[in-house]
Amino acid sequence: MIRIILTIFLFHLLNITILSWPDEIEEIPIKNAVGKHKFTADVSKAVAVERAKEKAKLDAMNKAGTGEDIIASETLISNESSKGKYKDFFSSFIKSHQRGGLKNLNFSKPKYHFVDEEKSFEEVTIELECIVLKYKTSPDPVFTASIGRLKSSYRDGDTFEFNINLTQRAYLWAFLINGSRGYRLFPNEYEKSNILKAGDEYSFPMDKKLKYTLELNKADKVEGHLLVLVFLKNDKVKFNLSQNNISPLSILEWYSLIPPDQKLIEYREFQVIE
C-alpha cells in the first residue's frame, strides 16, 4: 500500500459540509425510489445490497427527471480500482452527473425473496428516500486547467511534484487515490487554501519546506494511483479535518453536489515501482 508522506504532517479524513447554490440547483424530494438486484449463492448479500442501492439511486434520479445514470457503489469502486481502471471510473462517474446529484440518502432495510422454485436465484429490494439535486447550469467550456511535471511512473521514495495553470481563478482540492483509500493532498495543515489566479503557474507543494514523498508498500512491486484535482470557482464547499484516510466514493459524491458551471475536475494516473 502506497502512502503519501509529507515531511512534517499527516493526512486527515474529510468531513464535508456543503453550502447550497439555491439559484443553480433545484431540490426534488423523492420518497419511492426502488432498487432490485437478483443474485446467486456465489455472490455475497453485501455485494447484492450495494448493487441494489446503486439501482435505487438511478431510479431516484430518473424519477426526478435528470435522465442520467448514477454510479455510486463501494463495490464498483473497489473492483475498478483493483483492475487499475481509476481514470475510466472517474470519467464514467463525471459523465453520469452532468445533470444532477443526490443528498440526504435514507435506505430501507433490505428485503430478500427467492425468484425461482429451485431457490437458485434470490432478489434483494431496497427502497430509497432522498433529495435529488437537479442542475440548472451546464459545464463552463472555457474553464480549463493545464497540469505539468507529472510522470507516468515513479520509484519508491521519489518526490511527487506538479504544476498547475488555469484559464479562470479557482480554489484547488487535490486528492490521491489508491484502491479503496483516498488521501487529501492539498490543502493541508501547512498549505492553506488560496485562490489560484488565471494565467499564473503554481508549483506544488507550494510550501518549499515540504516534500510529497511516495512510499511503496514493501510487499508490492508496483501500485497504481490516481491524482484527482478538483477546481472550484468559489469556496462554498467546506472540509473539516478528522482521521487518516477517506473513501474515494465520498470525493465523487461531494463532487456531484456542486453545480457544473462551478467546478472542473482533472485526473492523472501514475504508478510507483520498486
Image (cartoon, helix red, strand yellow):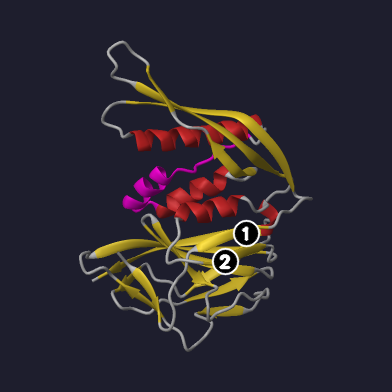
Vertical arrangement, residue 96 with respect to residue 14, above or below: above
Residue 114 colored magenta?
no
Q: Nearer the viewer, residue 75 or 137?
A: 75
Q: Is residue 93 left or right of residue 43?
A: right
Who's the residue at 45% across and 60% down the image? 246
What is the quadrant of residue 34 in the picture? Answer: top right
Residue 266 placed where, x, y %? 53, 61
Q: Is the residue under label 2 in contact with that under label 1 (CB below 8 Å)? A: yes
Vertical arrangement, residue 32 with respect to residue 158, above or below: above
Q: Which residues are magenta?
A: 67-85
Vertical arrangement, residue 67 with respect to residue 160, above or below: above
Q: Tag on residue 53?
A: none
Who's the residue at 41% across and 54% down the image? 86
What is the quadrant of residue 192 in the picture? Answer: bottom right
Element under disc 2: strand
Q: Tag 2: Cα neighbours inside 10 Å, few (<14), some, or many (≥20)?
A: few
Indicate the amino acid at tag 2. Asn
Vertical arrangement, residue 189 with respect to residue 146, above or below: below
Who's the residue at 53% across and 78% down the image? 189
Residue where numbered disc 1 is placed: 17
Is residue 144 in view from this perspective? Answer: no
Indicate the amino acid at tag 1. Thr
Q: Nearer the viewer, residue 96 or 4?
A: 4
